[in-house]
Image (cartoon, grey):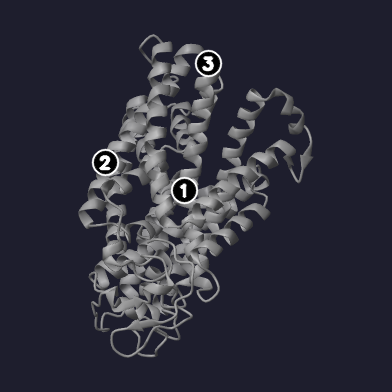
Amino acid sequence: MDAVYDRPATVTVDGPPRTSPGLYSPDLAPTKKEGRRWGAYNVFTLWGNDVHSLGNYAFAVGLFALGMSVWHILIAFAVASGLLLVLLNLSGYMGHKTGVPFPVMSRIAFGIKGAQIPAMVRGAVAIAWFGIQTYLAASVLNALVKVLFPGLASLDETSVLGLSVLGWISFLVLWAVQVLIVSFGMDLIRKYMAFAAPTILITMCALAIWMFVRADGSIALSTGDAPTGLAAWGEILRSAALWVVIYGTFVLNFCDFTRSAKSRGAIVRGNLIGIPVNMLFFAGIAVVLSGAQFKLNGEVITGPEDIVRTIPNTFLMVAASLAFITLTIAVNLLANFVAPIYALVNLFPRKLTFRSAGLVSAVIGLIILPWNLYNSPTVVNYFLGGLGALLGPVFGIVMTDYWLIRRTRVNVPDLYTEDADGDYQYRGGWHVRAIGALVPAAAVAVVVALVPAFESVSGFSWFIGAILAALLYLAFADRSRPARDVDGAAIAVDASSSAAH
C-alpha cells in the first residue's frame, strides 16, 4: 500500500460505524484490491535483495570455514529453502486475503490490545538490526572513501562516542538516504527493490566468475576432512535450521508486503523463483567465492567484502562496493525498517503516519549507537538472540489460529473496533489463551537458544518454540466462537484526504 500521510476527514463502514480511532489509521487500513501493485517480479526482488545480504554471505562462507563440504552446504540450503517456501506462502496468503499489516494481523490471535506484544517484539528486533546494518554499510562506504580520497583518512583517527568522525559521516549519509526513501512510502520501496535486485545479482555473479577464473577454473571442495554419515547429516540439518531462523523475522511480517500482491499466484511465483531457485544460486556463489579463495592461498574469507578489497582495478572495486551499499540499504528497508514503522503506527495510530513513524524508528536506530551493540557479543547473542527466539512461538500461534482454528475466516472490519461484541475483543482486548500459550513456549525457546547446556540443539530453538506454542494453543483454543468471514473492503477512507492505496 502507498504511504498515507494526511489524517482522513471521514471514515465510513458499511452498516453501523464501528471503527475505533485507537485501532485505525489509513496506513493500517486494508489495502484496496484495485491498488495492489506487487506482482511476481516484485515478490522475487524481495528475496533477490534479502538473500544476498552481506550477513548471509558471512553465514554461508562460515559453514565452509567450519569444515562442511560444498555439496553438504548446497544440500543444507536446498532443505532450508523448501521449508521457507512453505512457511512464507502460508504467511503471504494471509496478507493477500486480509490486506492488513502484521500488527493488525496479530489482533486475530492475540486480541486488539494483546497484539501489541508480538508487534513490539518484532519492531524492537528490527530497529536494533536497522542500526547495525546501517553501520555495516557505512563501514564499506568508509573504506571506499579512504581509497578514493586518501586525504580524508585522518578523519578516521578521531573517535566520537565509539565511532570515528569519518564513520559518523558515512553512517549519517546512509541513514539519511534510507529515511528519504521511506518517506515516500511503500511504493518507492517497491521500485527501489526492483532496481537493487538485478544490480546485486549481476555483481555477485561477476565476482564469482572472476574468482573462479583466478583459481584456474576449479575450487576447493572443503577446508579439510568434511564430516560423513550421520555426522554430516546432523551438520546439514543444523545449518538448514539456522538458515530458517535467520528468516524467522521475515516470515512473521511478510504480510506487510503481500498485502499489496496482485494475486496469490504472484506470491507463489515470486517465492518459487526467489526462494529455492535464488537461494541455491546464492549458495553456489558463496561456495565458489570461499572455495576459490581457499584454493588460491589457503585462507577462508569471512565475506565477499574481503574479496572486493583485493580487486586490483579501482573502477571495479568501486562498482562492487557501491553494489554492496545498495544491497545493504535494500535489505535494511525490507527486513528492518518496515516492521517497526507499522509497529509504531499500530501503537500510536492517532499521532503517527508511515512517514513520521519511519523517522521515529530511524532516530531510535541512531541514538542506540548500534556500532557499540554490534561490537558487544553479549548484547547481540543474549539480548537480540533472546528477542529473536520469541518470534518462533508468535509465528506458531498466529499460523495455528488462522489456518487450523479459523480456517482462513477473518472478520476484517472487527480488527478495527473496540466494541464489546467485536470478534477480537476477547477479554478486554486480550486473548488470554494465546498469551497462555506464548509465555511457556517463549520461555522454552529462549532457554534452548541461550543456555550453553542446550548448545547442540540451540539452532532449532525457533522450531521448538513455534511447534510448542502451536500445540499449546490448539489445546487452549476456544472452538465454540463462530467464525465469520468478512472482507476488508467494508472499510473505506475518504479518498480526498489520503494518497491512493
Q: Secondary structure at mark 3?
A: loop
Q: State the separation of the CA atoms marked 1 and 2.
A: 30 Å
User: Where 450 falls versus 404 (above or below)?
Assistant: above
Mark 2 highlights which residue?
273
User: Where 69 falls versus 265 (above or below)?
Assistant: above
Residue type indicated by callout 1: Ser
**Of the residues tagged 2 and 3, which is closer to the observer?**
3
Residue type indicated by callout 3: Asn
Residue type indicated by callout 2: Ile
Q: Residues within 10 Å of mark 1 (few under 14, many from 20)?
A: many
Mark 1 highlights which residue?
458
Asked if marks 2 and 3 touch (Cβ < 8 Å), the reply is: no
Q: Nearer the viewer, residue 443 or 338?
A: 338
Q: Residues within 10 Å of mark 2 (few under 14, many from 20)?
A: some
Q: State the separation of the CA atoms marked 3 and 1.
A: 43 Å
**Residue 258's image quarter?**
bottom left
**Residue 288's image quarter?**
top left
Numbered label attached to residue 313: 3
Q: State the separation of the CA atoms marked 2 and 3.
A: 33 Å
